Image (cartoon, coloured by chain):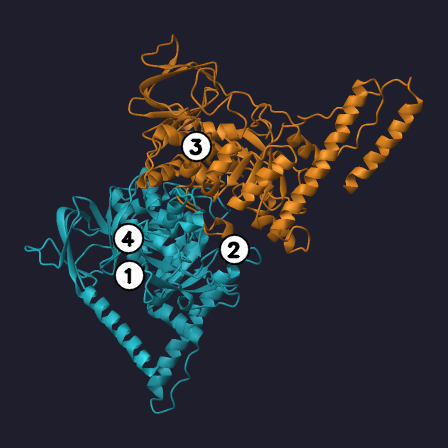
Chain colours: A cyan, B orange
C-alpha cells in the first residue's frame, strides 16, 4: 500500500513536471491581423511570440519558437473579458445547491472565490465567445455591500482564480424598502469614520511609539481602509444621476478608485464622469426604461459615453450563462455608433483597466490571453478558431456540442448509446 | 367537477319541465359572445408604395435578387423585376434587404412592461393553478415603451401571453404593433385566441410551495386532465342545450363558466394551445394529452429539448418556438444546444419558430435567428437566409393561426414589410423602414415615423 502511494505521488510529480515543461514551450502565431488594442493599432501580417504564458515579442526580426501557427491572415485579438457576473458560482440558476453567489449574511468581507468552481459547464461554453478572463461578482446578501469581486480565467484549471478579493461591490439606488439616502449616508459615514481613525492611529503611533500596539482593526475596517488607500476599487451598481454624482463626490473627498456598473443615467453627466476618470461597466443592449432610475438607457449610450471620453467596458448585464454573447453586444454597439476599435477596447483593454488586470491587450509582457477568429469577432457568422489562456491553447467544445452530436448521429440504438 | 353540479341540477329540472310543458314557447336562446372586446384596429395612413431593387426574402423559402415589391391598398400586390405603378411612392432599396414583418409568438410586452414597477406587474395571475378565465389582453398597457423598441426591430405582429406560473395561465392575445391608447386599437382583427399552458418546474414550484396541487410533474398532468375532463362535460352540456333548442325544446342553458369557456374554445378548435414546455418527455406527454381530450397540442414554447423529439413534433403537426441560446437558469433549460431550431426545422413538415420572451431580444429576432443559422452551418447544416427568415415570419404566423394573412410576401397578403439596411442576419443590420398593412409605422431616418410612449414624453 505504501509502495502504491509512492508510485501514485511520483506519477503526479511527473505530470506536474510535464505540464510545466509544456508551459515553458514557446509558440509563434504568424501571418495574423493583430488587433493590439494599444497605440500600435492593427498590425497586418504580424507575428506574436508567446512563452511562459506571456507575449514576449511582436514582429521580432527572427522567429524563434517551438511551434509555429500560421494564422492565414485571420484576426487575432486579446481575449475578451467578462465582468460582473456569477460564472463559476452558479451552475443552474434555480437549483439552490448549485448556487454559491449569495448569502443572506454576506457583508463587505464576503469572499466568493472560495466557492469558485472551474469545472462548471459554463466555462467551456463561454470560450465559444472568445472569453478568456472574467471578473466574478457575487450577489451578496441583504447588506448594501455585496462582497468582493475576484478574477478568474476560463482555463477551467483548478488554479484559475487569478486574483481574489480585488474590489468591493456596493449596490446603491432605488430600494424596495426604505430610502436610497440611508445607503449613501451609511457609505459616507463608514468612509469618514475609517478615515478619522486612520489619522488618529497615525497620530497616536507617532506620539506613543513605546506604548503597546494599537488594537488590530476589524476585518471590515481593513476592507474600508483598502478603499481609502486605493488598494481596492469601489465597484458601484447605481443608475440615477443623483446617485452617480454623490459617488463622484465621495471619490473626490476620499480619493477612491471608483467603477460604475449600470449607470443608466451616465449620459446626463458624461463630462463629469470623464473628468473624474471613472470607468462605466454597462450593457450595450439596455435601452428600455426598466425603472425610474433608468429612464435614459439607449443603444447609443456606449457610443455617447465613449465620445465624451468615458472609459466604457461592456458586459452582458448580470448574466452568467450568456456571457458568450459579449461579442454580439459589442457588434450591436458598433451598429449604434461606437467605432470598431472602441468596441474592441470595451471588451478587452477597458475592462482590464477598470479592474486592474494584466491582460486585455496584445503587447509584450502581457498575459497571453489571445483569440484567433474565423472572421470579424463581432459578427454572428464568425467563430473562435483558436483560443489561448495564459499562453495555453484550450478547446471551445462544450457539453452542448456533445448533445448536438448525439442527436444528429444516426443510430438504430437508443441515443444513450451514442457518446 | 363540483362547479358543474348546479348546472346539471338545472339541466335536470329543465328536462323535467320541458317534459310536462311540451307546448311552451322557447325562451330567447342563450348565446355566448365569443368576441366581447373586439378589435378597433385601423390601418395607419398608407399609400401605394413601390420598393425597388431589393434583395427579397419572401418568407416562403425563396430569395429574389434585384426585385421590386408593390404595395397597394395595404396588401402585397406584385413581386417581380422592373415593376412600375402610377402614383406610387417609390423607395430605393438598392443594396437593402426586404423581408416580411417580423412576428414574435411569445412576448409579455404590455403585461410586464417597462418600467417594471409593482403597479404594472400584470402578467401572471398566480392565485390558482388553473386560471383559464384570465385574458392577457385585459392586462395590456399600450403605453409600454417596449412596443416602440420592438417596432424599430421590425416586429409587426406579436402574441402577448400570460406567464407560466399556472398549468393554465389564461388567454393570450395577438396584437398589431401599432401605437394606440387602447388594447383593442392594437388587437389583430379576427386572430384566434391562444391558451397559455405550462409544463414542468414553474407550476409545481409555485403551487407546491403552497401545498396545493401540483407539487410534482405527475401533479401537473393530473391538473391538466381534471380540467380537460371538466371542460369536456361543459362542452357536452352546451351541445345538448344547442341540440335541444334546435329541436324546438326550451332547455335551460348550462351555467356560464368563464374559465371553462376558454377550455371549451380549445376543444371547439377556436383557441390555439401555446404551451410553455421545455423537456422532451413532457412535450411527448402533452401531445398525447391533446389526443386524449380531442384537441391539438399546438405550439411548444421554449422547447429547449425540441431537438430530442424533432420527428415527433413534425409528425404531430406541432410548432416549436425556441431561443437560440438561453440556458442554465433551470434544470429544464440545462440541455440547450445552439442548433435546436435547425434540428427541429430539418424534419419534413416541421414548424420551427424563433421567439423572444424578452423585451430586449424581441428587438433583434433577426439576430436571434441568425445565431441559429450560423452555428448550425458551423456544424454541418447548410441553412440559407431564405430559410432562416421563415422561423420569425411564416412559421410564426402558422403558430398563431395567421398563415393566410401575414408572415410572407405573396400577392394578396397583408403588406407587413421590413426594409433592412443589409442582410438581416448580420449583427450590424438595422430595420430602416417598417410597414404594417402597407402603412409606414417606423422609419429609422425620419423622426416623424418614430412613435414615443406617453410614459417617456417630457422626461426623456
Residue B153 position by quadrant = top left
**Which mark sits nearer the N-terminus, 4 or 2?**
2
Q: Is disc 2 surrounded by few (<14), some (14 to 19) or many (20+) residues within 10 Å? A: some
Residue labelled with disc 2: A94
Q: Secondary structure at mark 3?
A: helix
Residue located 50% across and 36% down the image: B313
Discs 2/1, front: 2
Residue labelled with disc 4: A348
Q: Are the residues under marks 1 and 3 on the same chain?
A: no
**Which mark sits nearer the N-terminus, 2 or 1?**
2
Q: Do the residues bearing badges 1 and 3 touch, measured as CB atoms within 8 Å? A: no
Q: Is residue B295 visible?
A: yes
Side of A14 where A157 appears, left or right: right
Q: Are the residues under marks 4 and 3 on the same chain?
A: no
Discs 4/3, front: 3
Cα separation, mark 4 vs mark 3, equals: 34 Å
Q: Secondary structure at mark 2?
A: loop
Side of B264 where A284 appears, left or right: left
Residue at mark 3: chain: B
Q: Secondary structure at mark 1?
A: loop
Task: Point out which mark residue A357 bears.
Answer: 1
Q: Are the residues under marks 4 and 1 on the same chain?
A: yes
Discs 4/2, front: 2
Q: Is residue B109 visible?
A: no
**Which mark sits nearer the N-terminus, 4 or 1?**
4
* Residue B382 image offset from top left, x and y in percent: 32, 34
Cα separation, mark 3 vs mark 2, equals: 29 Å
Residue labelled with disc 3: B391
Q: Do the residues bearing badges 4 and 2 touch, measured as CB atoms within 8 Å? A: no
Q: Is disc 1 surrounded by few (<14), some (14 to 19) or many (20+) residues within 10 Å? A: some
Residue at mark 1: chain: A
Q: Quadrant of the N terminus of chain A?
A: bottom left
Amino acid at each position: 500500500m505504501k509502495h502504491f502511494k509512492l508510485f501514485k505521488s511520483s506519477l503526479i510529480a511527473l505530470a506536474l513536471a510535464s505540464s510545466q515543461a509544456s508551459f515553458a514551450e514557446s509558440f509563434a502565431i504568424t501571418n495574423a491581423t493583430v488587433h493590439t488594442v494599444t497605440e500600435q493599432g492593427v498590425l497586418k501580417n504580424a507575428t506574436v511570440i508567446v512563452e511562459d504564458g506571456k507575449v514576449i515579442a511582436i514582429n521580432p526580426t527572427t522567429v524563434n519558437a517551438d511551434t509555429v501557427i500560421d494564422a492565414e491572415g485571420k484576426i487575432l485579438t486579446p481575449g475578451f473579458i467578462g465582468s460582473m457576473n456569477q460564472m463559476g458560482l452558479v451552475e443552474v440558476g434555480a437549483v439552490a445547491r448549485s448556487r454559491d453567489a449569495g448569502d443572506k449574511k454576506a457583508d463587505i468581507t464576503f469572499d466568493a472565490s472560495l466557492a469558485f468552481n472551474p469545472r462548471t459547464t459554463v466555462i467551456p461554453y463561454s470560450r465559444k465567445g472568445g472569453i478568456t478572463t472574467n471578473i466574478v461578482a457575487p450577489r451578496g446578501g441583504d447588506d448594501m455591500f455585496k462582497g468582493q469581486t475576484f478574477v478568474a480565467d476560463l482555463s477551467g484549471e483548478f488554479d484559475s482564480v487569478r486574483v481574489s478579493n480585488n474590489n468591493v461591490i456596493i449596490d446603491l439606488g432605488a430600494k424596495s424598502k426604505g430610502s436610497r439616502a440611508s445607503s449613501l449616508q451609511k457609505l459616507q459615514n463608514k468612509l469618514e469614520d475609517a478615515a478619522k481613525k486612520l489619522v488618529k492611529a497615525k497620530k497616536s503611533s507617532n506620539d506613543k511609539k513605546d506604548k503597546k500596539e494599537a488594537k488590530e482593526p476589524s476585518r471590515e475596517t481593513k476592507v474600508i481602509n483598502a478603499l481609502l488607500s486605493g488598494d481596492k476599487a469601489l465597484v458601484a451598481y447605481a443608475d440615477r444621476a443623483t446617485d452617480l454624482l454623490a459617488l463622484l463626490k465621495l471619490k473626490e473627498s476620499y480619493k477612491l478608485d471608483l467603477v460604475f456598473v449600470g449607470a443608466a443615467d451616465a449620459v446626463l453627466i458624461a463630462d463629469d464622469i470623464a473628468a473624474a476618470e471613472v470607468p462605466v461597466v454597462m450593457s450595450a443592449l439596455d435601452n428600455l426604461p426598466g425603472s425610474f432610475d433608468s429612464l435614459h438607457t439607449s443603444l447609443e449610450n456606449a457610443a455617447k459615453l465613449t465620445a465624451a471620453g468615458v472609459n466604457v467596458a461592456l458586459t452582458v448585464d448580470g448574466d452568467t450563462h450568456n456571457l458568450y454573447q459579449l461579442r454580439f453586444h459589442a457588434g450591436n454597439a458598433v451598429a449604434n455608433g461606437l467605432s470598431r476599435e472602441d468596441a474592441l477596447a470595451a471588451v478587452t483593454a477597458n475592462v482590464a483597466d477598470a479592474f486592474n488586470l494584466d491582460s486585455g491587450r496584445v503587447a509584450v509582457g502581457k498575459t497571453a490571453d489571445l483569440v484567433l477568429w474565423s472572421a470579424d469577432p463581432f459578427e454572428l457568422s464568425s467563430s473562435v478558431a483558436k483560443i489561448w489562456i495564459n499562453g495555453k491553447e484550450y478547446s471551445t467544445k462544450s457539453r452542448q456540442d456533445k448533445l448536438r452530436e448525439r442527436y444528429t448521429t444516426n443510430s438504430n440504438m437508443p441515443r444513450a448509446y451514442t457518446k | 367537477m363540483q362547479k358543474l353540479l348546479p348546472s346539471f341540477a338545472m339541466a335536470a329540472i329543465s328536462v323535467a319541465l320541458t317534459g310536462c310543458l311540451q307546448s311552451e314557447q322557447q325562451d330567447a336562446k342563450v348565446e355566448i359572445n365569443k368576441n366581447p372586446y373586439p378589435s378597433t384596429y385601423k390601418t395607419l395612413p398608407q399609400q401605394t408604395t413601390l420598393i425597388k431593387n431589393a434583395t427579397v426574402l419572401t418568407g416562403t423559402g425563396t430569395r429574389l435578387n434585384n426585385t421590386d415589391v408593390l404595395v397597394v391598398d395595404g396588401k402585397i400586390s406584385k413581386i417581380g423585376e422592373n415593376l412600375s405603378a402610377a402614383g406610387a411612392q417609390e423607395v430605393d432599396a438598392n443594396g437593402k434587404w426586404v423581408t416580411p414583418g417580423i412576428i414574435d409568438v411569445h412576448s409579455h410586452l404590455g403585461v410586464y412592461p417597462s418600467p417594471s414597477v409593482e403597479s404594472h406587474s400584470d402578467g401572471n395571475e398566480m392565485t390558482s393553478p388553473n386560471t383559464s378565465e384570465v385574458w392577457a389582453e385585459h392586462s395590456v398597457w399600450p403605453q409600454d415603451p417596449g412596443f416602440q423598441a420592438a417596432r424599430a426591430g421590425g416586429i409587426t405582429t406579436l402574441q402577448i401571453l400570460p406567464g407560466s406560473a399556472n398549468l393554465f395561465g389564461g388567454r393570450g392575445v395577438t396584437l398589431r404593433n401599432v401605437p394606440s391608447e387602447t388594447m383593442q386599437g392594437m388587437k389583430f382583427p379576427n386572430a384566434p385566441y391562444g391558451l397559455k399552458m405550462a409544463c414542468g418546474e414553474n407550476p409545481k414550484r409555485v403551487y407546491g410551495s403552497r401545498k396545493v396541487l401540483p407539487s410534482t410533474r405527475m401533479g401537473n398532468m393530473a391538473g391538466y386532465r381534471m380540467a380537460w375532463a371538466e371542460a369536456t362535460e361543459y362542452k357536452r352540456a352546451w351541445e345538448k342545450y344547442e341540440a335541444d333548442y334546435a329541436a324546438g325544446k326550451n332547455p335551460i342553458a348550462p351555467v356560464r363558466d368563464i374559465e371553462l369557456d376558454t377550455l371549451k374554445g380549445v376543444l371547439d378548435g377556436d383557441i390555439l394551445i401555446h404551451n410553455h414546455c421545455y423537456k422532451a418527455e413532457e412535450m411527448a406527454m402533452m401531445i398525447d394529452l391533446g389526443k386524449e381530450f380531442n384537441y391539438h397540442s399546438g405550439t411548444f414554447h421554449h422547447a429547449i429539448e425540441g431537438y430530442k423529439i424533432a420527428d415527433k413534433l413534425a409528425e404531430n403537426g406541432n410548432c416549436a418556438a425556441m431561443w437560440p441560446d438561453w440556458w442554465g437558469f433551470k434544470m429544464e433549460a440545462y440541455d440547450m444546444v445552439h442548433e435546436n431550431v435547425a434540428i427541429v426545422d430539418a424534419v419534413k413538415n416541421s414548424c420551427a419558430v424563433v421567439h423572444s420572451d424578452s423585451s430586449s431580444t424581441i428587438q433583434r429576432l433577426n439576430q436571434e435567428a441568425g445565431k441559429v443559422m450560423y452555428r448550425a452551418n458551423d456544424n454541418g447544416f447548410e441553412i440559407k437566409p431564405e430559410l432562416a427568415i421563415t422561423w420569425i415570419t411564416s412559421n410564426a404566423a402558422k403558430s398563431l393561426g395567421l398563415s393566410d394573412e401575414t408572415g410572407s410576401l405573396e400577392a394578396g397578403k397583408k403588406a407587413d414589410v421590413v426594409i433592412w439596411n443589409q442582410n438581416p442576419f448580420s449583427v450590424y443590420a438595422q430595420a430602416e423602414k417598417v410597414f404594417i398593412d402597407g402603412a409606414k409605422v417606423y422609419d429609422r431616418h425620419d423622426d416623424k415615423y418614430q412613435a414615443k410612449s406617453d410614459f417617456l414624453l417630457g422626461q426623456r
